[in-house]
Amino acid sequence: MEPSLWDGFLTVVETSGFDVSTLQRRFDAYGAIAQEREDHVILWELEEALVDHDQAWSLWRTRHALAAERQIGGAAGTAGSGVDYLRRRVGLRFFPELWEARALFLGEPQAAAR
């Protein structure tokens, strides 16, 4: 199996000098990148691009659910699922760690204590 985009991202973070071997160490890296953006511009912009990707998919899923509801109402869709199923998928994230890191490091100051 080929490496995923996530695997590639972690490799870039690791080759930039951060330890990504555990979840806690990855969060330490995300915190350092977020708090010292000037020193880690490329990594910050890469994180931004991945979060942008997630956001775009979430918006697409929302629009898809609305379009399906407009066209079929509450009926089952082509795969047997319906609008409720589509709405449950809106919040899915490809890179949930990056979203959690934002809540920790870019939100309320007390949230950074992990």
Image (spheres, grey):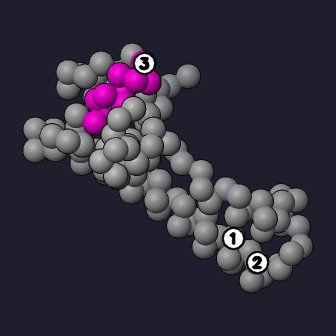
Measured in 3D between alpha carbons, the distance from the residue under mark 1 to the one under mark 3, in whole angstroms, is 36 Å
Q: Which residue lies at the image location 74% right of the left edge and 74% below the top edge?
A: 68
Is the Cβ of the residue at disc 2 closer than 8 Å to that at disc 1? yes
- Look at the image and tell me whether residue 108 can be seen: yes
Measured in 3D between alpha carbons, the distance from the residue under mark 2 to the one under mark 1, in whole angstroms, is 6 Å
* Quarter holding residue 42: top left
Quadrant of image for the C terminus: top left
Label 2: which residue? 69
Label 1: which residue? 65
Label 3: which residue? 22
Residue reaching furthest to the left: 38
Amino acid on which the number 2 mark rests in the picture: Glu
Magenta-colored stretch includes residue 89: no
In the rendered structure, which segment of residues is drawn in magenta? 22-31
Looking at the image, is mark 3 or mark 2 nearer the viewer?
Answer: 3
Q: Which residue lies at the image location 47% right of the left edge and 62% below the top edge?
A: 56
